[in-house]
Image: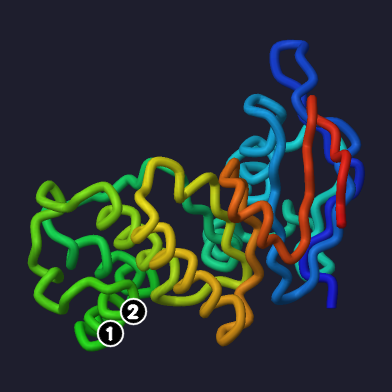
Amino acid sequence: MVLLELENIGYQIAGQTVLQQINLQVATQDYITITGPSGSGKSTLLRIIAGLLTRTSGQLLFAGKEWADYDPILYRRQVSYAVQQPQLFGTTVADNLRFPFQIRQQAFDSAQATAALTSVNLPADYLNKPVNDLSGGERQRVAILRNLLFPPQVLLLDEISTGLDDENKQILHREIRRMNQEKNVTILAVTHDNTEIKDANRLVKIVAGKMEVDQ
């Protein structure tokens, strides 16, 4: 089943063409790795798919319906976006893991939250840990959990492993793979990491705003 369909997507800003004629079909449970030189438009493409930027041209379909026809809040619950520099808020880890429950007007499930922490090698007592005391890798793990406590249909990853050590990369990749394989979460991941590129199930390359490779 085609879950996402991009037809001739283009994006311009201040007279400059950032993306042009991007065509891509994404099936349910796909894991697509997106690579290419810095400044080629990869992150811009993810932000368009996430609904954070409005394309200049083309059509973006999600589950067969034009993106603009969705309620933006409901759409972003199903198409979740994670960035390289995680933005944690509040005082503690619990404040961040409570947020997905709050926006759905549900009671916070501490057991679900602690199980999620365990899945990325963080102890249960980290629920009460101040976010300012977390390492960079721990912050990224908490940020990813915030996206995955209620698994979206699509998870967009924008260079989330950049700057992390091998251990943190492996922990993140293991959990993301698990969500892809066990929860049918469709993944689109921008990366410059050679190992991730080598291990890609399906590789897309963007150069100077154009998609060169889809294999």
Pick whichever, 142 or 94, lies toward us.
142
Q: Nearer the viewer, residue 159 or 128?
A: 159
Q: How many marks?
A: 2
The label nearer to you, 2 versus 1, is 2
**Residue 54, numbered label:** none
Instruction: Using the image, tell me which numbered label, if any, was put on residue 119.
Output: 2
Residue 138: x %, y % from top left: 25, 57
Residue under the image location 68 percent in, 38 percent down: 42
Please tell me which residue is depicted at 13% across the width and 69% down the height of the picture.
Answer: 126
Is there CB contact under 8 Å for labels 2 and 1?
Answer: yes
Name the quadrant of the C terminus. bottom right
Mark 1 surroundings within 10 Å by alpha-carbon count, few (fewer than 14), some (14 through 19), many (20 or more): some
Q: The residue tagged with tag 2: helix, strand or loop?
A: helix
The type of residue carrying mark 2 is Ser
- Residue 10 quadrant: top right
Q: Amino acid at mark 1?
A: Ala
Q: Nearer the viewer, residue 146 or 189?
A: 189
Give coordinates of residue 41: x percent, y percent: 70, 32
Residue of label 1: 115
Residue depicted at 78% across the width and 42% down the height: 205
Q: What residue is at 66 percent from the left and 62 percent from the top?
A: 199
In the displayed structure image, the side of residue 12 where residue 87 appears, left or right: left
Q: CA distance from mark 2 to mark 1?
A: 6 Å
- Crowding around mark 2 (Cα neighbors within 10 Å: few <14, some 14 to 19, many 20+) is some
Q: Is residue 102 left or right of residue 48?
A: left
**Rendered position, 48 above or below 17:** below
Reply above or below: 99 against 191. below
Question: Quadrant location of the N terminus?
Answer: bottom right
Q: Position of residue 144 (x, y in %)?
A: 40, 62
Residue 14, horizontal then vertical, whole percent: 70, 12
Residue 114 in the figure: left or right of residue 144? left
